[in-house]
Image (spheres, rainbow, N blue to C red):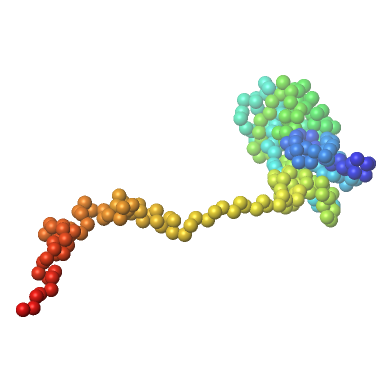
Amino acid sequence: MTGSEVPHAFRLAYVPGVTPAKWVRIWNERLPDVPLALAQVSSAEVFGVLRSGDADAGFVRLPVDRTDLSAIPLYTETTVVVVPKDHVVAAAEEVTTEDLADEVVWQPLDDTLDWEKLPGRPAIERPATTADAIELVAAGVGVLVVPQSLARLHHRRDLTYRPVSDAPTSRVALSWPQADPTPDLVEEFIGIVRGRTVNSTRGRPQTPPQPKAKGKRPEAGAGKAGGAGARRGTGGGSGKPASGKSAGKSPRGGSGGSGGAKGGKGGKGGKPRRRP
């Protein structure tokens, strides 16, 4: 294979908390000759990576500037509050922002939630990253409200989390630079994320439909003959009537066959009269 024939690698960026393993596995099954390169990028930097061409597509968090980027919303995450395991919140199944009114709620600089008003008591500073905020919570200082995937990403044995029913949510989307037409490899990945089959018209070329085998048509009347025989019962095969009476029996109980024979042996109507 020459250098010009080496397939272009597909470069996929993703923000922390997103797990692209399922889609990567499908890609490797369908396009084993095209390598897929993964790069984790912060939520603040991922759009610059897409615009610069350093990634062909990326899993991002909405909102997306649709001026030069396209996006497909995929799912909405549950928002949780991260607290120490011995915190009073840990005893509840779910809390509201009002339940956090007396807590210091950290808002790191890479916060992905769109707050109108941050709940709780104001903090003296904003941690640089979510990881830094997690360290403060583990030290027993304040709590942190984040998408559930980030709570899982920064899991610690001494911390737990509970859903916050009325907090803003984070929506994950697939985004890519706008182009006309959309590059083939990007179109392929869009199809995988949307669940298209391998033969989808917008994915790889469809396999031509195979002609159906021509079966032998049943002979005309074959079904009717069987049905008629079934309706005749036991007499259908022999031609005898279905009733128990013998065919040709006279009303007086004599046999039609014997009567015919007698008539043929010399009955008055059987021979011509002699003339004198």
Left or right for 88, reference 107: left
Residue nearest the viewer, comparing 252 with 110: 252
Q: Quadrant of residue 270?
A: bottom left
Query: Is residue 202 positioned above or below 156 on the image?
Result: below
Residue 30: give x, y in percent of width and height. Answer: 76, 41
Camera-nearest residue between 275 and 77: 275
In the rendered image, the vertical position of residue 172 relative to residue 80, given as above or below? below
**How far across and how far down the image is residue 83, in percent?**
71, 26
Tell me the residue at 67%/21% (across/down).
86
- Say whether residue 182 is visible: yes
- Residue at the spot 73% in from the left edge and 33% down from the top edge: 149
Q: Residue at x 13, y 70 (%)?
A: 271
Image position of 138 (left or right of 49):
left
Residue 101 in view, yes or no: no
Quadrant in the picture for residue 3: top right
- Determine the residue located farthest toward the right in the rendered image: 3
Residue most toward the front?
A: 276
138, above or below 106, in the image: above
Exactly how many numbered labels are in the figure?
Answer: 0
Q: Residue furthest left?
A: 276
- Relative horizontal placement of residue 182, taking residue 90 as reference (left or right): right
Identify which residue, 200 or 159, lies in the foreground: 200
Residue drawn 75% across and 38% down?
29
Quarter in which the C terminus is drawn: bottom left
> What x and y, as percent, mark residue 141?
76, 25
Residue 191: x and y in percent read: 74, 47
- Locate the N terminus by quadrant: top right
